[in-house]
């Protein structure tokens, strides 16, 4: 596996700005200790939102990871104590194969439930950051008897999850979880629909980004940046950022690329959860469409601000409702116009033609038209990007995110 650890200390520091890495105290007295649990060793949106919280939590905290990977390296480099409780068979359970693999994974599941419960003993709160963490942490409640906070990063609809998983989540939420905090109103509404719980029992805290990290790129102009990153220089360049997976819709962007002969496209991200067949299908699609010479596969990158600043327009092409979409607020913070698929949490971020551009999910023609429009009207694109930057500062800063998370977690222990 390719290492994604930051190459040097400044790259590490850039992911958690020093100005909020100290002095963070919990509202409930500053001494509330937390065990954070996350199933993934990989760096996805849920992990990037846990990172600043774990780094800045002033009282005792630890992160228990159910898989090893670059997320551990990143946490440790930032001084967060990490423990591993890996079980290969449990890690291999994917949401789409949940019924097939559960039985074989049962011994590992029991070990992980016990392991989480044992580690939780010396903490006040168990903070579950992902679906598997929820299931394993909540099932162990009779053993650890700790208060459970679940950070919901998913839309709990039938489009994203199978009936068994939805059923498990429904009952665990009702009987074992003390507090839920959702990453968007779309995620919250899906949980309310699934469980019948009161909307006010699922507070929403939107993700936040470090504006300084994304807006300051030193003195490099776009040309120099593209040369440094090995990107084509004198072309109109679109960027699509995020893991390669069918529902992230990279194939839609390739279709749009085929319709716009002057456009170049860079895909930044890799298949984090074994979607190799999809990556292969993208390469075949590019060859079939004859767009290979205008397409760059950049792989997973640590320096997202640089890659985002190097493009003219940022695309978001998810074909299913996105629970939140960190890449969108990052793109806005990088001062680039973002064209996004209008569903789920995205509509809580993007205001069409004001701070971004919305297109119907999966609609190639609409996406191609939106790109053409922004390319043809650079003043409009700039106006949108300027407003986006203002809106991120106002509504999606990491400081606001941490403040609201702190307040929400603080309520758990009063
Ligand atoms: N990301 C990254 N390098 C990459 C691709 C993605 O650091 O090459 C980060 C991206 O900056 C964002 C996160 O991965 O912070 C993806 O979060 P998002 O909510 O957009 O999608 P998710 O993967 O959680 O579905």
Image (cartoon, helix red, strand yellow):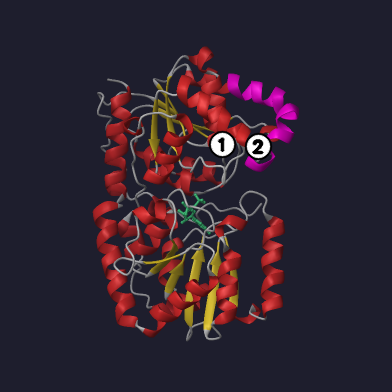
**In the rendered view, does 187 fall on the left or right side of 43?**
left
Question: Mark 2 highlights which residue?
Answer: 91
- Image quarter of residue 408: top left
Instruction: State the predominant SS element of the stretch in magenta.
Output: helix
Q: Earlier in the sequence, mark 2 or mark 1?
A: 1
Give the residue drawn at x 47%, y 16%.
121
Q: Are marks 2 and 1 in contact (CB under 8 Å)?
A: yes
Task: Establish if 308 lies above or below 41.
Answer: below
Q: Residues within 10 Å of mark 2 (few under 14, many from 20)?
A: some
Q: Nearer the viewer, residue 3 or 242?
A: 242
Give the residue displayed 37% in from the left and 49% down from the top: 16
Instruction: Report if residue 231 is visible in the image.
Output: no
Quarter placement of the C terminus: top left
Residue indicated by mark 1: 39
> As drawn, is 74 to the left or to the right of 293?
left
**Vertical comparison of 246 with 161: above or below:** below
The segment highlighted magenta reads 95-114
The secondary element bearing badge 2 is classed as helix
Q: CA distance from mark 2 to mark 1?
A: 8 Å
Q: Which SS class for mark 1?
A: loop
Say which quarter of the image contains residue 329: bottom left
CB of mark 1 near ligand 1 (< 8 Å): no
Measured from the top left, where is residue 44 in percent x and y? Answer: 51, 49
Residue 2 point in image, percent of width and height = 63, 54
Q: Nearer the viewer, residue 6 or 45?
A: 45
Of 250 and 49, nearer the camera is 250
Residue 265's place in the image compared with 25, above or below, is: below
Instruction: Name the disc covering residue 414, or none.
Output: none
Instruction: Give the crowd class for mark 1: few <14, some 14-19, many >=20 residues within 10 Å.
Output: many
Does residue 262 show up magenta in the picture? no
């Amino acid at each position: 596996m390719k290492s994604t650890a930051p190459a040097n200390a400044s790259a590490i520091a850039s992911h958690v700005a020093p100005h909020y890495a100290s002095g963070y105290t919990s509202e409930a007295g500053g001494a509330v200790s937390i065990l954070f649990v996350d199933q993934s060793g990989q760096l996805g949106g849920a992990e990037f939102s846990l990172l600043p919280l774990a780094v800045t939590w002033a009282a005792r905290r630890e992160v228990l990871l159910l898989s090893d990977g670059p997320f551990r390296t990143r946490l440790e480099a930032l001084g967060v104590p990490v423990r591993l409780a890996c079980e290969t068979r449990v890690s291999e359970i994917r949401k789409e194969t949940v019924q097939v693999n559960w039985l074989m994974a049962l011994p590992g599941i029991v070990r992980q439930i016990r392991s989480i419960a044992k580690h939780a003993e010396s903490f006040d709160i168990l903070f579950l950051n992902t679906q598997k963490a929820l299931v394993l942490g909540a099932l162990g409640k009779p053993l650890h008897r700790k208060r459970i906070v679940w950070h919901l990063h998913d839309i709990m609809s039938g489009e994203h999850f199978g009936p068994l998983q939805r059923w498990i989540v429904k009952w665990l939420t009702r009987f074992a979880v003390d507090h839920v905090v959702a990453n968007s109103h779309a995620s919250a509404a899906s949980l309310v629909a699934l469980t019948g719980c009161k909307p006010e029992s699922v507070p929403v805290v939107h993700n936040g980004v470090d504006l300084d990290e994304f807006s300051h790129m030193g003195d490099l102009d776009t040309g120099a940046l593209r040369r440094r990153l090995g990107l084509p220089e004198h072309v109109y360049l679109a960027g699509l950022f995020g893991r390669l997976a069918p529902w992230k819709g990279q194939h839609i962007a390739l279709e749009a690329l085929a319709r716009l002969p002057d456009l170049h496209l860079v895909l930044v991200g890799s298949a984090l959860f074994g979607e190799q067949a999809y990556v292969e299908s993208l390469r075949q699609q590019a060859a079939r469409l004859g767009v290979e010479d205008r397409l760059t596969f950049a792989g997973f990158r640590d320096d997202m601000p640089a890659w985002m600043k190097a493009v003219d327009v940022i695309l978001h092409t998810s074909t299913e409702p996105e629970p939140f979409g960190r890449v969108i607020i990052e793109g806005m913070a990088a001062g680039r116009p973002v064209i996004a698929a209008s569903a789920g949490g995205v509509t809580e971020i993007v205001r069409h033609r004001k701070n971004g551009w919305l297109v119907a999910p999966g609609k190639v023609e609409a996406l191609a038209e939106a790109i053409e429009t922004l390319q043809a009207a650079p003043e409009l694109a700039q106006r949108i990007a300027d407003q986006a930057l203002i809106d991120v500062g106002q509504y999606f800063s990491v400081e606001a995110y941490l403040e609201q998370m702190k307040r929400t977690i603080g309520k758990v222990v009063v």
